[in-house]
Image (cartoon, rainbow, N blue to C red):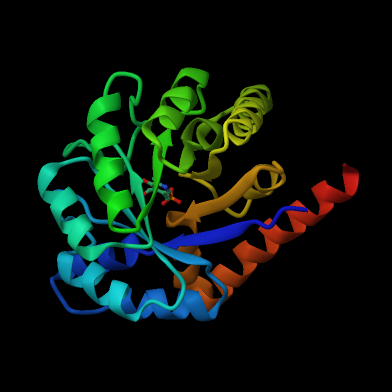
Amino acid sequence: MRPIYLGVNIDHVATVRNARGTDYPDPVTAAAVAELAGADSITTHLREDRRHITDRDVRIIRETIKTALNLEMSVNDDILAIAVALAPHKACLVPERREEITTEGGLNVVAEESRIKAAVDKLSAVGTACSLFIDPEREQVEAAQRTGAPFVEFHTGRYANAKSEQDKARELGKLSQMAALADSLGLGVNSGHGLNYQNVAQVAAIPQMHELNIGHSIIGRAIFTGLDEAVRTMKEIMLRARAQASLKD
Ligand code: PXP
């Protein structure tokens, strides 16, 4: 049985802080609590408009983290320069549009291969392991491999937003097939976006899934149960799903 890891995205702790312009709740504290509860890495998106996570947040988290910092970032020159100086353990390259509420789709690696490869090369040179956030599509997986990035992260939004059981099964099938393809090409496979306590088990059961990056549902639950419980419960569901799936093999 392959292990499965949980990356906790703490951006929305910063969203609450920034809504009032206060210095609390602090995402730095959230990172520490999430780690103590079993998070395997801490994921943050330093957006170009700094709507939640700030430069100060990523700098302190990078200095104090005990697990690994996974920096979500666009392939913008300014952000890339910050990332290269920060040298996070991992970076997930994502498309970014100012008007979007959250990341809406995967990168078009096929169309932007050379620009993305250049960013992967710069980050790899400082020891950062890159993943490319893509939709689970064959052409994108193959292009991702050509960039030399060691990981892909599949956008699970279409699976999470599927309205009917039929659509959900179809999207899950794509994730499963593309995970197998990526794995066969030597890529590590992560996933994220829209995963929650009700829909995560099926994704965690896909044997090639290495790490799931989950934010909104965990921080939303933490309002009622505390962050410790919210992280522990998510991780338990993932580990149980992986163990049960491996018994069926
Ligand atoms: N992975 C990536 C690349 C993302 O952009 C996001 C959203 O910031 C997530 C994972 C987490 O998504 P969610 O907050 O819906 O769990």
Name the residue at the front extreme: 125
In the picture, the quarter occupied by the C terminus is top right
The residue under the point 55% across, 42% down is 189
Residue 168 in picture, x, y percent from top left: 63, 29
Give the answer, above or below, for where 103 lies relative to 21. Answer: above
Along the viewing direction, whichever of 112 and 23 lies nearer the viewer: 112
Give the answer, above or below, for where 233 lies relative to 177. Answer: below
The residue under the point 57% across, 31% down is 185
Q: Is residue 30 left or right of residue 74?
A: right
Q: Which quarter of the figure has residue 162?
A: top right
The residue under the point 46% across, 18% down is 139
Residue 226 seen anywhere in this rendered image of the structure: no
Q: Is residue 95 left or right of residue 185?
A: left
Residue 63 in picture, x, y percent from top left: 29, 78
Give the answer, above or below, for where 215 lies relative to 222. Answer: above
Name the residue at the left extreme: 78
Q: Which quarter of the figure has residue 184?
A: top right
Q: Is residue 152 left or right of residue 175?
A: left
Name the residue at the right extreme: 248
Residue 199 in picture, x, y percent from top left: 62, 45
Residue 229 seen anywhere in this rendered image of the structure: yes
**Number of numbered discs:** 0
Residue 166 in picture, x, y percent from top left: 68, 22
Give the answer, above or below, for where 88 lies relative to 246. Answer: below
The residue under the point 76% across, 59% down is 240
Q: Is residue 12 left or right of residue 184?
A: left
